[in-house]
Image: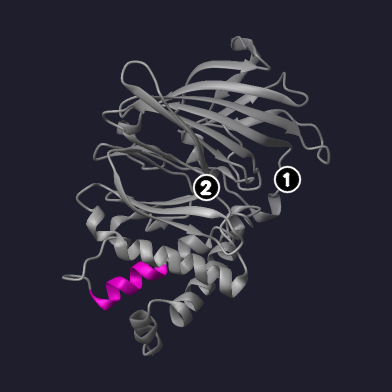
Amino acid sequence: MNETPIARLADYQPPAWRVRHVDIAFDLDLDASEVDCTLSLEPDPDQPLAELVLDGEDLELLAIQLDGVPLDADGYGHANGRLVIPAARAACRLRTRVRIHPSRNTRLEGLYASRGLLLTQCEAEGFRRITFFTDRPDVMPTWHITLRAERARFPVLLGNGNPLDTETLADGRHQAVWENPHPTPCYLFALVAGTLDSVSRDIVTGDGRPVRLAVWATPDDVPRCGFALDALERALRWDEQRFGRYYDLSQFNILAAQDFTMGAMENKGLNIFNARFILADQDTATDADYLGIESVIGHEYFHNWSGNRVTLRDWFQLSLKEGLTVFRDQEFRTRCGHPSIARSTISTP
Ligand SMILES: [Zn+2]
């Protein structure tokens, strides 16, 4: 049995290898998904050259290539949650293909299945359960993400960033391609696949960028997503007016998930929420319910700058991104939120 090593702030070392770009493609299914990932890697010139070591847990390695050349068993080491590539000595492209099992993933870290949906949770160290990677927040590649699945079972395929392309494939399958052009650590990676519907709104940011805001849920839940969509637009406008921070992608998607262990997660351009922080209707929701939704929507949206674009060096800095973002969401709630909510907050002792 492996024991988790103790991490100490005093032991922090900058990463010896940088991942500049990730090209990752998924063949999605509930029982077995395959992940084909090419990492564009380079040694950090300011660090001593070190062996290339990647994190990976519960991954079934199907194929591995270094700069297009398949590695035989002597060319890599794979044990105890580590993939070691001794032959990597300079800038290179490492391609791996792995199989993972979302429906067996009871840890709900990485890619997991929930009521016919596939979704992810990667903060803090879940991405290593999706593919081999330097799973730490100070490694920040750009991302090209391809999601493929059977259209009938997974008609909606959402990823981080900007939607680039969709395509119909053979055998009833389809694919969606997403691109996240902003250097982003892997703990902010997300995908969602399944039968979903949405409420959406097209807006233009204060600096002129057209953006589609959308809240996704199972079709039965969509009629109760309207307040969350309104709250999202209020949060976006408030961050523009209060801090001069403009949204930086062409879509902002939120998923309301019934099974989600975190309250909500600020994945880049694709927030995933526990549905209780999204769904509300006027017949049953209380002021406190609306306040909670407004607050959490604002909090996760504000992370786009405080946490995502300006991110962590290491997990000892978690309180910095959370503390600053809580400060921002509290200001939002008390000063600029929904009028009834602002009143109820101000009257709170
Ligand atoms: Zn947060």
Q: Which of 180 and 49 is in front in this view?
A: 180
Please tell me how crowded label 1 is: few (under 14), some (14-19), or many (20+) other residues with Cα within 10 Å. Answer: few
Relative horizontal placement of residue 52, taking residue 130 as reference (left or right):
right
In the picture, the disc for residue 140 is none
Report which residue position mark 1 lands on.
14
- Secondary structure of the residue carrying numbered label 2: helix
Q: Position of residue 20 (x, y in %)?
A: 68, 36
Whether the residues at callouts 1 and 2 have beta carbons within 8 Å, the answer is no
Report which residue position mark 2 lands on.
188
| Residue 346, quarter of the rendered image | bottom left
Image position of 48 with respect to 230: above or below: above
112 is within the stretch colored magenta: no
Work out how far the residue at label 1 is from the one at label 2, CA to CA, in angstroms: 20 Å
Q: Position of residue 17 (x, y in %)?
A: 72, 35
Task: Answer yes or no: is residue 116 visible.
Answer: yes
Dominant secondary structure of the residues highlighted in magenta in the image: helix
Image position of 318 with respect to 155: above or below: below
Q: As shown in the figure, which amino acid type bears the numbered disc 2?
A: Leu
Q: Which residue lies furthest to the left in this view?
A: 283
- Secondary structure of the residue carrying numbered label 1: loop
Which-is-in-front pick, marks 1 and 2? Answer: 2
Of pointers 1 and 2, the one earlier in the residue sequence: 1
**Which residue is located at x 29 percent, y 59 percent?**
225
Quadrant assignment for the N terminus: top left
Point out the stretch of residues depicted in magenta.
286-295
Relative horizontal placement of residue 192, taking residue 196 as reference (left or right):
right
Q: Where is residue 300 in the image (x, y as percent from the top left)?
A: 46, 60
Task: Answer yes or no: is residue 28 visible.
Answer: no
Q: Where is residue 157 in the image (x, y as percent from the top left)?
A: 39, 36
Q: As shown in the figure, which amino acid type bears the numbered disc 1?
A: Pro
